Image (tube, rainbow, N blue to C red):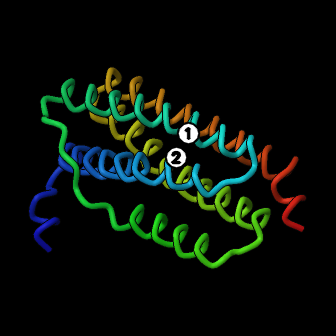
Amino acid sequence: MALMKDIQTLDDLFVHTLQDIYYAEHQILKALPKMMAKATDPELKAGFETHLRETEGQVQRLEQVFAMHGHQPKAVTCPAIDGIIQEANEVAGDIADKSVLDAALLASAQAVEHYEITRYGTLVAWANELGRSDCASVLQQNLDEEHATDRKLTQLAEARVNRRAE
């Protein structure tokens, strides 16, 4: 209920959602090294490593958007990303077969990507609605990277990882 009092305008909602994805990106920065350590497929490991570097850049872009919009970077807890990461850890902890584990890790990574895509897509739309095409263009860069990562993960799953898990 306290949250609703703080959000009265689309601008308030935009800032809150920026804070949400800022938190999510920081949680992803913590989760990716653990996922890399568990993965056995070399291409999957490399994909996680690439995404880790991209995520660092996405955090910097978010900080840029906060500044452009006149706010200090701040994170608010995002139960959705916490749940996705917790589920990934639980599933990965239950799988002994390394090929199946890779498929599970990849699926978990895609769940994260899809969450990020929804958040960035919404933020781009709201930034445009608020007349902040400058913020929208920076956020669009993050959205484009998330889409590209999702496509790469799909290709990897279909070409290698899922087949090995059969």
Q: Residue at x 30, y 51 (%)?
A: 23
Crowding at label 1, few (<14), some or many (≥20) Cα neighbours within 10 Å?
many
Q: Is residue 2 left or right of residue 40?
A: left
Q: Quadrant of the N terminus?
A: bottom left
**Which is nearer the eye, 119 or 79?**
79
**Picture coordinates of residue 157 (x, y %)?**
79, 52
Taking depth in this image into account, of 77 and 129 the one nearest to the observer is 77
Q: Residue at x 47, y 42 (%)?
A: 121
In the rendered image, the quadrant that contains the C terminus is bottom right
Q: Is residue 66 above or below residue 94?
A: above
Q: Are marks 2 and 1 in contact (CB under 8 Å)?
A: yes
Q: Which mark is residue 117?
A: 2
**View extreme (top): residue:** 134
Residue identified by numbered label 1: 146
- Name the residue: 29% across, 44% down: 18
Q: Is residue 144 left or right of residue 158?
A: left
Q: Which mark is residue 67?
A: none
Helix, strand or loop under label 2: helix
Earlier sequence position, callout 2 versus callout 1: 2
Is disc 2 surrounded by few (<14), some (14 to 19) or many (20+) residues within 10 Å?
some
Q: Is residue 63 left or right of residue 21?
A: left
> Looking at this view, is 138 or 56 the one in front?
56
Q: Secondary structure at mark 1?
A: helix
Amino acid type, mark 2:
Ile
The residue sitting at 66% across, 54% down in the picture is 39
Q: Position of residue 130 (x, y in %)?
A: 27, 34
Where residue 111 sits, quadrant-wise, is bottom right
